[in-house]
Amino acid sequence: MPEMPEIETLARQLRRILVGKRIAQIRLSGLPLRKPVPRNLALTLRGRTIHRILRRGKYLVVEFEPGIFLLIHLGMSGRLFYHPLAGIEAEHTQAVFVFSDSTELEYRDHRRFGLLALYEGIGVDWIPEVLSLGKDPLSRAFRGEWLWELLQKSRTEIKSFLLDQRKVAGLGNIYVCESLFAAGIDPKRRCFTLTMDDSLRLAEGIRNVVKSAVRHRGTSFSDFMDSNGNLGKNQDFLMVFQKEDVKCVRCGENIRRIRQANRSTFYCPHCQK
DNA sequence: GCATTACCCTGAAAGC
DNA sequence: TGCTTTCAGGGTAATG
């Protein structure tokens, strides 16, 4: 389940590998992802050179010259692999981008919750999926004061709020659970009940959790690998996620698991108030 | 307008 | 052992 730190890890790696490469051919499975893959994708991108690779929230944005964007979202089970020309597709391979130097980038996604979309004629931050994103935890604008103002307007539970990409871009279930633990905040708290002090701690908690995960090259349970097939290391540093009935590292109380908005939440009932 | 729920999908794990 | 059921979750459309 790739979240922002996993996408950031991929973006940094693909930037080194792919910028300057020219697309020779694109092969598609023909199966729909979250939305159907654009019919003109292969025709539009063939012969074009990769100019930049950016990340916006959990989206990878590949910019081709001149101003053509391929938007990639890995959903829950999407993976990207970079390797020499193989010719034979693995099961669940949805797209293969073949480069003119006989290497290829393969997109695999067995659940097909991911997205491949094409945009041209607009700036990267005007892509609709990007435009609707909230602030990025790694940006300078991501501050406790800003978060507090937003929280005052919402009656929903803080856990659900943080999963909403229109509010904060890039967090998923793992990093929301870890951030709330880092800040000592109960995931069931209603947003408007958080004080300025809570918001400052939460913003700092989110930033620290995300930065640390990027340093560890992401969290790997079953689905995330980088484009060379290497696993991340961040799962060794998690405090609460998937730790039901494990003792809390701070107080020794058992970590509890509850269900919120159809997602599992892991938290320490003693440390998180 | 906002909050909540249901749905898409398939592999793994649990249950029988 | 092998079949069936349940669960996992990101994003979004539908519903309340």
Image (cartoon, coloured by chain):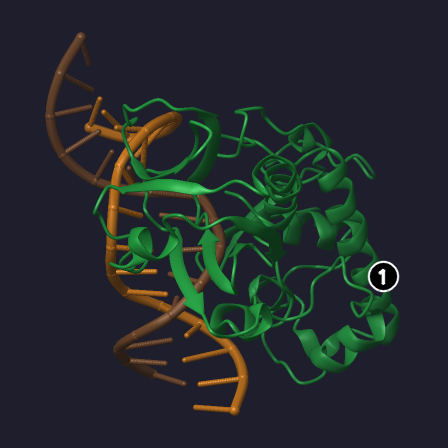
Chain colours: A green, B orange, C brown
Q: Nearer the viewer, residue A84 or B12?
A: A84
Q: Residue furthest right?
A: A197
Q: Position of residue A227 (x, y in %)?
A: 53, 31
Dot 1: few (<14), some (14–19), or many (≥20) neighbours within 10 Å? some
Q: Residue at x 61, y 42 (%)?
A: A6
Q: Nearer the viewer, residue A122 or A142?
A: A122
| Left or right, residue A219 beside residue A70 | right
Residue A271's place in the image compared with A93, above or below, is below
Q: Position of residue A62 (x, y in %)?
A: 53, 53
Q: Residue at x 47, y 36 (%)?
A: A80
User: Could you tell me how many numbered marks the image carries?
Assistant: 1
Q: Position of residue A209 (x, y in %)?
A: 76, 47
Q: Nearer the viewer, residue A243 or C10?
A: C10
Q: Residue at x 50, y 42 (%)?
A: A1
Location of residue A202 by image quarter: bottom right
Instruction: Tell me which amino acid carries mark 1.
Output: Arg
Location of residue A200 by image quarter: bottom right
Q: Helix or strand or loop: what does disc 1 sit on? A: helix
Q: Which residue is mark 1?
A: A201
Q: Nearer the viewer, residue A186 or A235?
A: A235
Q: Which quadrant is the C terminus of chain A positioned in? A: bottom right
Q: Position of residue A13 (x, y in %)?
A: 64, 36
Residue A144's place in the image compared with A102, above or below, is below
Chain label for disc 1: A
From this viewpoint, is residue A265 visible? no
